[in-house]
Image (cartoon, helix red, strand yellow):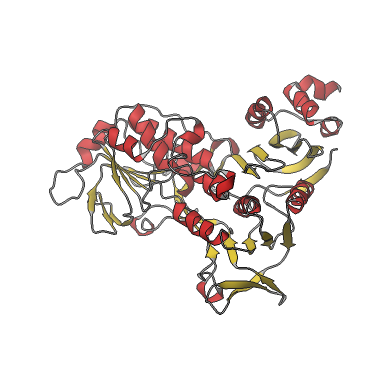
Amino acid sequence: MATVSNSLSLKHGLSLCSPHFSSLNRSFHTPTVGYRTVYRNYVVASSAFSNENREFVIVGGGNAAGYAARTFVEHGMADGRLCIVTKEPHAPYERPALTKGYLFPLDKKPARLPGFHTCVGSGGERQTPDWYKEKGIEMLYEDPVTSIDIEKQTLATNSGRLLKYGTLIIATGCTASRFPEKIGGNLPGVHYIRDVADADALISSLEKARKVVVVGGGYIGMEVAAAAVGWKLDITIIFPEKHLLQRLFTPSLAQRYEELYKENGVKFLKGTSIKNLEAGTDGRVASVKLEDGSIIDADTVIIGIGAKPAVSPFERVGLNTSFGGIQVDGLFRTNIPGIFAIGDVAAFPLKMYNRTARVEHVDHARRSAQHCVKALLTAQTTLYDYLPYFYSRVFEYEGSPRKIWWQFFGDNVGETIEIGNFDPKIATFWIDSGKLKGVLLESGSPEEFQLLPKLARSQPSVDKSKLQKASSVEEALQKLRNPYMLQFS
C-alpha cells in the first residue's frame, strides 16, 4: 500500500532556527587547541575553592555528561582533571529507559539502576559510580550550579561550594514543561518525568491507580501510555493535535499506531484542550476538566507536553540563548572563550541542512559530547555534521503480543510515500524536489535499519510514481539502494 500526502517539517525534539551556518560560524572565537593552553590561562591555585581547581568541569549529569566523561578517559585526560556537577543523586544514565522499561510492573522485569548507567545504551562500558572513582573523576552529586562568574572562572552551587574551572562544558539538558499550579499542575498524583525520582513517584502512583490520563500525544505520551498498558489500567491519552506525534507521523501512519494502542485498551481524546485538573476530597487529582466542560475521571495524570532547555543560570552572563538553547558553533564552542555546550541544551549548526537546530534526543547527546571533547583535547577541527535521528520503542514488556520499534533519519519535508501495511512492517519516505529527504521504518530488520542513515545522507533521486509501485518495504528499500531500479522499473 502506498499513499502520497503533504508533510510538515520535523519539530518534535528538533528546534529549527536561522541564521545560516556560515553567518553563525563567523561570530565565534578561534578555538583553544589542546588542554595545556587552557590550563595555563585559567587555573589559579586557591584554598578558597571547594574543588582542587579542576581543569575541566561539566555542569549536568545526563547522557551527554556521561559520554563526555568516557571521551576524556579515552584521551587520558580525566584522572584528577575532570569534575562533574549534577543535581541528581545518580551517576549519568540512559534517560530513555525512564519512559520505557523503567515503568513496567515488577512481573514484567522493569529496568533498574545500575543496569542502564551510561554508556550501555550504545554498547559501551557501564559507568557506575565506582567507575568514576576508578577513573579519578570528581563527582559532585545533588548540588546544582546556581550562578557563574565568567571573569573569575568560578561556579557557585546550591550548597555554597565555589568551583574553579579551566574549561567549562554545559550539559544541563532540559526540564519538563509543566502545567501552571493554578490549573492543578502541582496536585499530588500529577506527574512529569525527567529523572529517576520522577519515575519512582509515577510507579508509586501506578501501583494504586485505576484510571490514568496521559496528556500529550508525542514521544513521552506514547511511551508512557504503552508502558502503563502493562499495569492493566484504564488509560486515556488526551492531546490537542489531530493525531499522534503530529510533528513526524503522517495521518495514515498515526492511524495505524492509534489502532494498535486501541487494541491494547488505550482510549484517545484528540483535538481537545484541558481547562484544569481537579482535586478530590483527599487533595489528590481526581479528574481532568476539558475546555468543552466534559470531565474525565483520573487518579493519576502524566503530563508529557514537551521540554525547555535548562539555560539558567547561564542566561545573564553573555551566552547567546536567542535560539532557545545555548548557541554554539560546529565544535560546540559558545561565544565566550573556554565555555562549551552539548546535548539538548545546545543550539548548533545543522550542517547538512544549513540551519541551526536544537535536538532533544539521546543520539545527539552522545555524539555531541564525543565531538566536543575530541575537538577540545586534540587538534581536530572537523565541524559537527549531524544527521537527525529519532527512534522509539513501545510495548516491550514481557508478555506483550507485539513489540514496536521504529527509526527515523533525515528531514521530514516535502511529500510522503507510504509502503507496507504495518503488519509486519511499514515505511514512510519523504520526497522533496525529486530527492529522498527522510525515511521512517517500523519493524525493520537490522540490515534495513543500517541502510536508513545511508539513504538519508546521500539523498538519492527518486521517481515517486516508480517508488509507489513497490509491493513491499523490502522492494522499496532495494529500489532506493539501487537507483537503476527506480529509473527503469
Left or right of 376, for residue 358: right
Q: Quadrant of the C terminus?
A: top right
Q: Nearer the viewer, residue 219 or 202?
A: 202
Q: Nearer the viewer, residue 460 or 12?
A: 12
| Residue 148 image-quadrant placement | bottom left
Q: Nearer the viewer, residue 118 or 229?
A: 229
| Picture residue at 43% right of the left edge, 45% below the top | 62
Q: Residue furthest bottom?
A: 281
| Picture residue at 73% right of the left edge, 64% below the top | 271
User: Is residue 142 among the parts visible in the rendering?
Assistant: yes
- Residue 54 at x, y percent in the picture: 23, 41
| Picture residue at 47% right of the left edge, 37% below the top | 366
Q: Nearer the viewer, residue 273 or 196?
A: 196
Q: Quadrant of the N terminus?
A: top right
451 versus 314 height, above or below: above
Q: Residue furthest front?
A: 107
User: Is residue 22 among the parts visible in the rendering?
Assistant: no
394 versus 188 height, above or below: above
- Residue 17 at x, y percent in the picture: 56, 49
Left or right of 347, for residue 58: left
All told, the count of numbered labels is: 0
| Picture residue at 58% right of the left edge, 47% below the top | 107
- Residue 79 at x, y percent in the picture: 26, 33
- Residue 313 at x, y percent in the picture: 36, 58
